[in-house]
Amino acid sequence: MKIIGIITILLSGSIMIYSTLDFPEWGDPLSPANTHLSVYYIENSMPDTSVPNIVTAILADYRSYDTMFETTVIFAAGLACFLLLRNFRKKKKEYSLYRHIPTGVTLKIKNSADLADDTKLFQRIDSTWVPFDLVTRTASGLIVPFIQIFALYVIAHGHHSPGGGFQGGVIFGAAFILFAISYSLRESLKIISEKTAVILSCVGVMIYAGTGLLCLLFGSNFLNYGSLAQILFTDPVSARSLAILFVEIGVGLAVAGVMIWLYYNISSSGKYNQGL
Amino acid sequence: MSEHYPVLIVIIPFIFALIVAFAGFIKPRLCCFLTISALILSLYSSIILLFQVFKTGCIEYRLSGWSPPWGICYNIDYLNSIIIVVVMIVGLMCAISSQKAVNRDLDQKKGAFYALFLLFITGLTGILATGDLFNLYVLLEITSISGYALIGTGNNKAAFASLKYLFMGTIGASFYLLGIGYLYISTGSLNMADIAAIIPELQQSKTIMFAFIFCMTGLFIKMGMFPMHGWLPNAYSDSHSATSTLVASLTTKVMLYVMIRLILNVFLPDYSFSKLNIDNIMVWFATVVIICGSFLALSQKNLKYMLSYIIITEVGYIAGGFWLGNRLGMTGAILHILNDALMTMCLFLSSANFIYVLKNDSFKNFKDIFLKMPFSAAGFVIGGASIIGVPPTCGFFSKWYLLSAAQEAGHYEFFSALIFSSLICCILFFRIIEQGFFSEDDHENNVTKFNEAPVSMIIPLGITVLLLIAAGIYSGDIITNFIDHAIPDIIT
């Protein structure tokens, strides 16, 4: 079976290499990809949308419908992970473990009544050996706010430089995941609960779709931002630029929410206990 | 408002999917109601769209207001408008029928389940409506991801089946994406109509040929064509019956639609049939698919496995009929896409009813099924009759077209494969019917009780049976009003 696999891979690999022989020259300015559609985008993206970054203009305006569904792909991945992994059944354990925070001693309590998960003195843990690492916590606590501010910058500055909703959302989500890794899942759930993460991602996609629907209500085609000029009190071209910002914020929220939600489900295999 | 229907059919399920995901955490009882109302609304818009196409011809809708080669557009024409209606009907029937089983098995995850259900429909409708190759890929991703998740909910083998499907599906989608990349390199465009205008100048280009090969390979994997069918039987049989009905009746058919769309409207029949000259090979290929699929179906011991292999043979019917290359064959293939979606739905709905009551779909449990579950069994018989091709049901008419097309094109191997597989289907279904009617146990000792599935599962099955017969009776109208216009005039 392995040999068949290797033969198939070699065969399709060589077909793919052979198929590249007829390609236009690398970087050829006269190749179809550079002469057919690109010319219009390069010449008109600034007067059409007043966005200096052509990539953002294509992504969030000319082909905004694709981008909306790309966000939905990420959202669907979050839903899929939840549907397959989330485990609502709570197993009754014979004992539960608590750590006495001031001394670091681990207590094993048999037949414990429903004690609070976390108090000032005791912290609930799931395995006997849970490291208490001061250095990681302090270091990540210092750096997380800066990463988050950088994420906001990336989202907001997508008009002018590389960046935008997807990248900013991922950075924001990653910052929170760093926090969740260095502390514990229970503590991060206190800050952003499962419900909040879901609502964040739903609202994010909804902002995108809602912008499109608003255009529909003002009588133009779906996602035709120009018609939003009436409520934004500007001309249609700057309305497009502003609407792109809204949409990018929506994408950022959705991606950050889904990142956090995915981490919650995968790191605790759906049980929402202590996590990694 | 009337000009916005092309986008509404996609946007309504999409927006409702977001609301349902949200509602799953706040008011889970609302989820099912919201799903059904979303599907009713989009079914309504798709029917209006069908009438608009019937009256005025093709409709173009420019998303974001940009004109086609630069922006994305939706093209609703004679080919896809009618398939969209069928997709919506199947979605609605599955949603109604799945309520009880989902409440029983997936209580706390209802919100996510129905949100993915709606996203799956959104993806399929988008694939059908779009006039842009890359937009098609994005929606294919949505369909696939929600499909993997839906299939993963099932018995304990479902997760593994879903993983296998995920690997195969990802390879298929990547091949398709590679094909689009090749097309973009050689034409510089992603719009279907725009590419179709450029391709006649590039007949000799190797890149176009490889784009064609990669796109078709990707789609063959996705539609479960015979050597690449490995993922299909397990994925459809091990999954929860609420999802297998939806996924099994729609995925393969929509992928076949994409194949037909690419050949007729992107690569153009002139290039695909005359220049590449692969139609004979493809018909032989389909013949092998049909025969192997029939034999594999014969060797199964569980109902859903058997139905999954029947789906593989049906893929062979449609692909082979289309590659015959004459007008009759294409008519038969497109008609069979519609009919097969309904037939598969009918069979899977009744198997869902059996599984709901019997908790198992092994053939051993079907003793006295006609006493126990008369309505579900009757639905099963009519679905089976349609697969075999018994006249008043719609399966007969599309098979008739395929047979006469094979005879006209002189492909007698395909002709005999069709007849052969119909005979095998007779054996398959009569074996079950025999077990249901004439079981060997004496009836006096163990009296079988009437134990039918809930009404909410019987009504969709009843409607499906009526649709099967209606589609058979009105197949002439469907062909003259829609399918005839969908096939370009150069094909005779």
Image (cartoon, coloured by chain):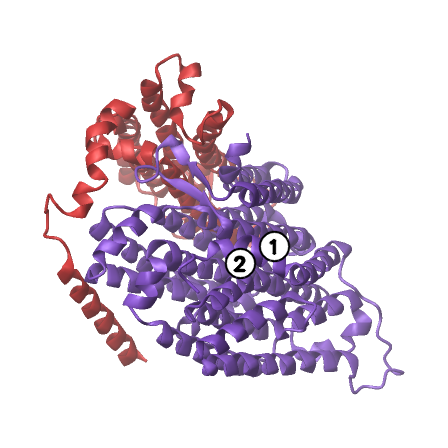
Chain colours: A red, B purple
Q: Mark 2 points at which residue?
A: B250
The residue depicted at 44 percent of the width and 30 percent of the height is A221
Residue type at numbered disc 1: Val
Q: Nearer the viewer, residue A94 or A161?
A: A161
| Residue B68, percent from left and from top | 34, 39
Number of other residues with Cα within 10 Å of mark 1, as a class: few under 14, some 14 to 19, many 20 or more: many
Chain hosting mark 2: B
Q: In this view, does B171 lie above or below B195?
A: below
Residue type at numbered disc 2: Leu
Q: Quick check: B121 left or right of A129? A: right
Q: Name the residue under label 1.
A: B90
| Residue A11, percent from left and from top | 23, 73
Do labels 1 and 2 touch, CB within 8 Å? yes
Q: Which of A78 and B277 is in front in this view?
A: B277
Residue B227 appears in which quarter of the rendering? bottom left
Viewport quadrant of the C terminus of chain B: bottom left
> Upstream in the sequence, badge 1 or badge 2?
1
Residue B26 appears in which quarter of the rendering? top right
| Residue B444, percent from left and from top | 89, 83
Q: Is residue A270 above or below residue B289?
A: above
Residue A35 in sight in this render? yes
